Amino acid sequence: MSPKLSRTIWLLSFVSLFTDMASEMLYPVMPVYLREIGFSVLMIGILEGIAEAVAGLSKSYFGGLSDRTGSRLPFVQWGYALSAVSKPMMALLTKPWWIFLARTTDRLGKGIRTGARDALLSQEAAPGQKGTVFGFHRAMDTMGAVFGPLVALAFLYFFPGQYTWLFLIAFIPGVFAILLTRLIREGPNQPGKPQAVSLLHAFRYWKESPAQYRSLVGGLLLFALVNSSDLLLLLKVRESGYSDQQVIGLYIFYNLFYALMAYPAGRLADKLGMRNVFIAGLALFSLCYAGFAFQDNVYGYLFLFICYGAYAAATEGVAKAWISGLVDRTETATAIGTYTGFQSIAALLASSLAGATWYAFGPAWAFGISALVALVLCIYFLRLNR
């Protein structure tokens, strides 16, 4: 029998779809726009580093605040609202301080909403259906990453170079997301421990968290350290001689396959176990990165992006569902917020390490090391909880 998804799950999923659509409309053009208004490569790197650090530090803090108050919805509404407002902010002024403020506002919005939203999804899931719910939400979120670049490509085809207008247009799906959050109704929640919450909340929670949680998240964070930005995959395709349109086309294809696979992968995780599906996804990641180390054929890239979409579907939503099943429901937002916060910091290190390895030894080493570490981690997760 097909699982029943509640009204709240549908609304949160559509909110994520519209928000990601707005973000992904700007993803392909953001570096070009920043260079055009005078940002150097170094400044772009600093901008993204600060923005991601804000997101990482705030996820555990606001997750802890959500758990302590027993409230989810205000964090969801404010988080999505800030992300939506940040899009037109980028078009209003081109002063570096304003661009930093706009980008930080977007990432702060993500930090505010992530833990509370995922806790709300977890408590809306029927017993034995956490993988299904997180998989469905991930599928809808990723469809935004399909529609967003398509809208951007179409707009820039007819109005080349009109980046300012694109930032303003990206506000439209953001408004839809804000309006949808107003339709969500939150049921009664049980407040968590009456303890103070600070920016160092993640470290305190890590020490107090269950041993199973630390074992799982420790492995996930080690994987995050070798899981560099998808931009490096796209750069490898670009350096193989393919056009910008072909590169963006492959990125859209990957997101479409990912979106189509996420819901079935979540349902499979509920039936076969979170660990088994996650390990299968990790093995696909290893295969994919090993292929990118040596591949330069368009059909080979198509196959690898199919594998990469299947890997993402089998790991991203499944990891959160797995975590939510290991902690008390009054700690769900903190647990997921702590994980995703540390993950943001690890992702920054991963891209820096991969970039340095690429620069010093070439892309084969950068991708090959990641593939090998992921394969070793398959063994680690296989032995977990035994």
Image (tube, helix red, strand yellow):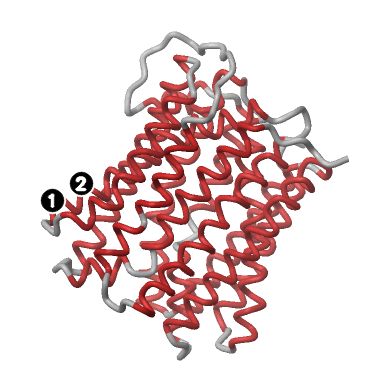
Residue on which the image places disc 2: 101
Residue 266 at what x, y percent from top left? Answer: 72, 46
Q: Residue at x 45, y 32 (%)?
A: 76
Tell me if 362 is positioned left or right of 219 in this view. Answer: left
Tell me if 263 is positioned left or right of 247 in this view. Answer: right
Q: Secondary structure at mark 1?
A: helix
Question: Would you place residue 160 above or below residue 220 in this image?
Answer: below
Q: Residues within 10 Å of mark 1 (few under 14, many from 20)?
A: few
Which of the numbered marks, if any, corresponds to residue 97? 1
C-beta proximity under 8 Å, tags 2 and 1? yes
Residue 178 at what x, y percent from top left? Answer: 42, 39
CA distance for labels 2 and 1: 6 Å
Question: Would you place residue 19 above or below residue 210 in this image?
Answer: below
| Quarter of the C terminus within the rendering | top right
Q: Amino acid at mark 1?
A: Trp
Q: Is residue 98 visible?
A: yes
| Quarter of the N terminus within the rendering | top right
Q: Amino acid at mark 2?
A: Leu
The extreme right residue here reads 1
Tell me if 383 is positioned left or right of 349 in this view. Answer: right
Residue 219 at what x, y percent from top left? Answer: 58, 45
